[in-house]
Image (cartoon, rainbow, N blue to C red):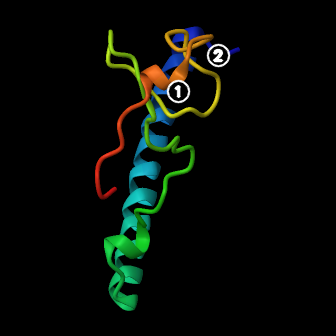
Amino acid sequence: MTSYTELLAQKAELEAQIAQAQAEAKAQAVAQARALIAEHGLTAADVFPQGKAKGSVGVPKYRDPGTGATWTGRGKPPNWIKDKYRAEFLIPEKAGA
């Protein structure tokens, strides 16, 4: 039967091997990505478009004058506006917007 200290030594050796293999795989992936980007003339905007992010909640419509906290009017209302007349908390729209 293998002793506890021997098992710990084996674990450390395996973790070092895993880290080395991971670093090599990452370097290879980066090289492949760079080659594809160069081959196809891609830009950062092509690879990482700046479209509307998933989960984006939109532009705030209401503001708590006491704390400055905002709410878009979507989802569950925060406590500072819950059960209150919302028009009092409306953020004025900017002219030309």
> Few, some or many C-alpha atoms within 10 Å of disc 1 (few <14, some 14-19, many ≥20)?
few
- Please state which of residues 42 and 45 is positioned toward the viewer in this rendering: 45
Residue 20 position (above or below residue 10) = below
Which numbered disc, 1 or 2, marks the residue closer to the eye?
Answer: 1
- Please state which of residues 16 and 10 is positioned toward the viewer in this rendering: 16
User: Which amino acid lies under the numbered mark 1 shown in the image of this protein?
Assistant: Gln
Residue 71 position (above or below residue 52) = above
User: Which amino acid lies under the numbered mark 2 shown in the image of this protein?
Assistant: Thr
* Distance from Cα at disc 1 to Cα at disc 2: 10 Å
State which quarter of the image contains the C terminus. bottom left
- Please state which of residues 19 and 42 is positioned toward the viewer in this rendering: 42
Mark 1 touches mark 2? (CB < 8 Å): yes
Q: Residue at x 42, y 71 (%)?
A: 47
Give how far across and how far down residue 42 sits, in percent.
36, 82
Residue holding disc 2: 2
Dividing the picture into quadrants, the one containing residue 78 is top right
Element class at badge 2? loop
Give how far across and how far down residue 75 sits, in percent.
64, 30
Residue holding disc 1: 10
Give how far across and how far down residue 4 sits, in percent.
58, 10
Residue 2 position (above or below residue 72) = above
> Few, some or many C-alpha atoms within 10 Å of disc 2 (few <14, some 14-19, many ≥20)?
few
Q: Residue at x 40, y 62 (%)?
A: 50
- Please state which of residues 4 and 31 is positioned toward the viewer in this rendering: 31
